[in-house]
Amino acid sequence: MEQKIGDIKKLFQAADEKMLPELIETYLKDERAGVQSCINSARKRLEALAKEKERCFQLLSYEREYSAFSYICGIDEVGRGPLAGPVVAGAVILPKDCDILYINDSKQLSEKKREELYEIIMEKAVATGIGYATPERIDEINILQATFEAMKEAIGHLTVTPDLLLNDAVTIPGVSVKQVPIIKGDAKSMSIGAASIIAKVTRDRLMVQYDQVFPEYDFAGNKGYGSAKHIEALKKYGPTPIHRRSFIKNFV
């Protein structure tokens, strides 16, 4: 009895990429349009996977260049621009044989994808660290110096001592470890991209919690950035304890 197209479709949909070549081979001679459609979709999935693997290979070019170093750590921050909340830095040491796909600059990823990758990075990384600089500290020493402090804290929370830092654009003062600043590094280095993801997810989750405390400001939606609703609430209700006083002078 001929297998139903619907059942074949379910097989293809449930299959992971490793199983697809065998499925394609099995049903290649089935000339029914529905089956051929499944095969074409499977081939597109495999082509997309091959492109992603090639992109990730390129994303590891700095890690390969400095492969003589045992523990290469990517460093990045999020939250330099918002009116409220901390700046958060991430530090990630990935394994030498890292096989995580879809890592990118966190701003290029959907929230759902960032959350998925966060869990994978936290599971597979050799070590991770997070650092914070509070709004008060940002006001006290300025955003750049506060960012450096958050980065140093993130490095300090690693359970493994790095012997090379790949940084997104900056050179961190007062750090003895060799540093390589890379412009737009979160889109050029997998280690920096991974650091940007864990920093972004950590900070976003924190701002969602702040939204429960200060619901008028829509922190869950704007994450502390100066959206119209945020600025309107700021003018109406005034600043909260998590607002950066040096950032909101034009609004209050």
Image: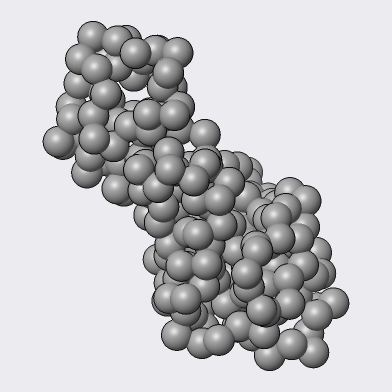
The quarter of the rendered structure image containing the C terminus is top left
For image coordinates 80% across by 64% down, the residue present is 58
In the shown orientation, is residue 51 left or right of residue 36? Answer: right
Q: Is residue 91 above or below residue 136?
A: below
Front-most of residues 252 and 165: 252
Residue 180 seen in render: yes
Q: Is residue 37 above or below residue 249?
A: below
> Furthest-right residue in view?
65
Front-most of residues 20 and 143: 143
- Find residue 73 and report its image quarter: bottom right
For image coordinates 23% across by 39% down, the residue present is 210
Location of residue 106 in the rendering, given as x and y in whole percent from the top left corner: 56, 48
> Furthest-front residue in view?
140
For image coordinates 50% across by 51% down, the residue present is 146
- Find residue 243 and report its image quarter: top left
For image coordinates 41% across by 52% down, the residue present is 133
Location of residue 239 in the rendering, given as x and y in whole percent from the top left corner: 27, 24
Front-most of residues 160 and 38: 160
Residue 77 seen in render: no
The quarter of the rendered structure image containing the N terminus is bottom left
In the shown orientation, is residue 68 left or right of residue 118? Answer: right
Total numbered badges shown on the rendered structure: 0
In the shown orientation, is residue 27 left or right of residue 209? Answer: right
In the shown orientation, is residue 236 left or right of residue 3? Answer: left
Location of residue 41 in the rendering, given as x and y in whole percent from the top left corner: 63, 50
Location of residue 94 in the rendering, given as x and y in whole percent from the top left corner: 59, 77
> Furthest-left residue in view?
213
